[in-house]
Image (cartoon, rainbow, N blue to C red):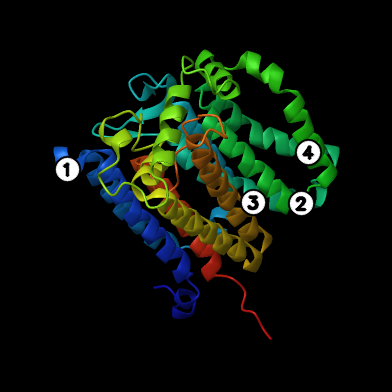
């Protein structure tokens, strides 16, 4: 049984925000999949089942002190590498949208990299806690690079640029909290920017096309630009209050591609307008704020690093997805946390939420 004192420390506000986002998700996915014409769709059913599984996962996580994960961080790290390698096993791995990022589990497909993001945070947080005293030395930096490189390279090889970008932001956020010298972080970011032209040459053809499309937004012949153009039309046509639920023309006439996943925010903007879009942004702001507060109140460095990694993950995914629907970020396939359709995504998000709540409920008591 969980100590009642711990239950009292659970951030009920954070839970309420996620419940609100999930309810909005079901409504928008039902519109994006045309339930008025098709009836209750598979996507709505899968999203509901995935969320229920996520609730069960959160409940299970509550029973474990998060420091238990730190005790087995090397095993967790090894498991994450193994999961990324499974996509190359014949009969197990599956190619979708040009990327070998999926595992065939019969009735459903699972994307290992979604869960690997969480496993990496749990293992990398302990690694950084152990190396914190030497993190600003040359030897410390080499060890950090050696730890972070394998999962990052495997994800890039799939190729899954979107998830690789998320993992990179997670690493930067955690290194910042681990007190890596700001000059080193700055030099690393500068080196990354300078190396972009070289990295472009090594990208997969479909990834280079997406970059070309982002740099030439007015060219509708470039793949990806059509998506963004239709998305901006949908959001703009929603004006202040939107066209109304199930009344979005860009959505109903299928001008808007992958509207239940990548461009779910465009459906929201068209049908609920600026007011609906702004409400969701406020929910996300409160969501991230409460997690930052939990990180600050964590009883140890390990807990603070875990929450920082997860907060960095959510923050980038939210910014990247909404940004690409408005044309200010390249199209990468990063879904909108708790809103976009996706069983793997919603379960992973719920697991991440459970871990954050776990750190928060075991925080130190504040004495005045």
x and y percentages locating residue 23 in the rendered image: 32, 56
Specify the label residue 132 is tagged with: 2
x and y percentages locating residue 336 in the rendered image: 45, 43
Foreground of the two, 55 or 31? 31
Q: Label 1, secondary structure: give it.
A: helix
Query: Which residue in the structure is indicated by mark 4?
Result: 141
Q: Residue at x 48, y 27 (%)?
A: 85
| Residue 142 left/right relative to 310 | right
Q: Residue at x 56, y 60 (%)?
A: 291
Residue 76 visible, this angle: no
Question: Which corner quadrant holds the N terminus?
Answer: bottom left
Q: Label 3, secondary structure: give it.
A: helix
Foreground of the two, 221 or 60? 221
- Separation of residues labelled 4 and 2 (CA atoms): 11 Å
Query: Which residue in the structure is indicated by mark 1?
Result: 36
Q: Residue at x 56, y 48 (%)?
A: 315
Q: Earlier in the sequence, mark 3 or mark 1?
A: 1
- Separation of residues labelled 1 and 4 (CA atoms): 56 Å
């Amino acid at each position: 049984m969980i100590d009642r004192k711990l239950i009292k420390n659970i951030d009920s506000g954070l839970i309420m925000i996620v419940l609100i986002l999930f309810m909005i998700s079901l409504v928008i996915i039902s519109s994006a999949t045309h339930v008025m014409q098709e009836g209750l769709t598979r996507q709505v059913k899968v999203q509901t089942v995935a969320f229920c599984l996520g609730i069960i996962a959160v409940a299970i996580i509550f029973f474990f002190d998060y420091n238990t994960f730190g005790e087995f961080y090397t095993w967790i790290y090894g498991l994450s590498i193994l999961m990324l390698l499974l996509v190359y096993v014949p009969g197990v791995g599956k190619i979708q949208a040009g990327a070998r990022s999926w595992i065939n589990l019969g009735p459903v497909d699972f994307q290992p990299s979604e869960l690997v993001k969480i496993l990496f945070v749990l293992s990398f947080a302990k690694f950084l806690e152990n190396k914190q005293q030497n993190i600003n030395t040359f030897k410390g930096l080499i060890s950090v690079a050696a730890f972070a490189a394998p999962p990052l390279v495997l994800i890039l090889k799939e190729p899954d640029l979107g998830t690789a970008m998320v993992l990179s932001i997670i690493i930067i956020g955690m290194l910042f909290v681990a007190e890596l010298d700001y000059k080193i972080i700055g030099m690393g970011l500068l080196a990354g920017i300078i190396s972009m032209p070289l990295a472009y040459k090594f990208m997969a053809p479909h990834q280079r096309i997406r970059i070309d499309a982002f740099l030439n937004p007015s060219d509708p012949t470039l793949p990806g630009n059509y998506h963004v153009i239709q998305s901006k039309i949908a959001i703009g046509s929603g004006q202040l209050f939107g066209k109304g639920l199930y009344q979005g023309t860009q959505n109903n006439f299928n001008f808007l591609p992958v509207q239940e996943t990548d461009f779910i925010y465009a459906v929201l903007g068209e049908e609920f307008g600026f007011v609906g879009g702004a409400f969701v942004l406020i929910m996300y702001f409160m969501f991230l704020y409460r997690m930052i507060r939990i990180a600050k109140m964590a009883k140890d460095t390990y807990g603070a690093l875990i929450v920082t990694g997860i907060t960095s993950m959510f923050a980038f995914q939210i910014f990247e997805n909404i940004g690409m629907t408005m044309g200010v970020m390249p199209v990468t396939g990063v879904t909108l946390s708790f809103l976009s359709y996706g069983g793997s995504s919603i379960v992973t998000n719920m697991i991440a939420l459970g871990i954050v709540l776990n750190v928060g409920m075991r925080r130190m008591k504040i004495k005045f």
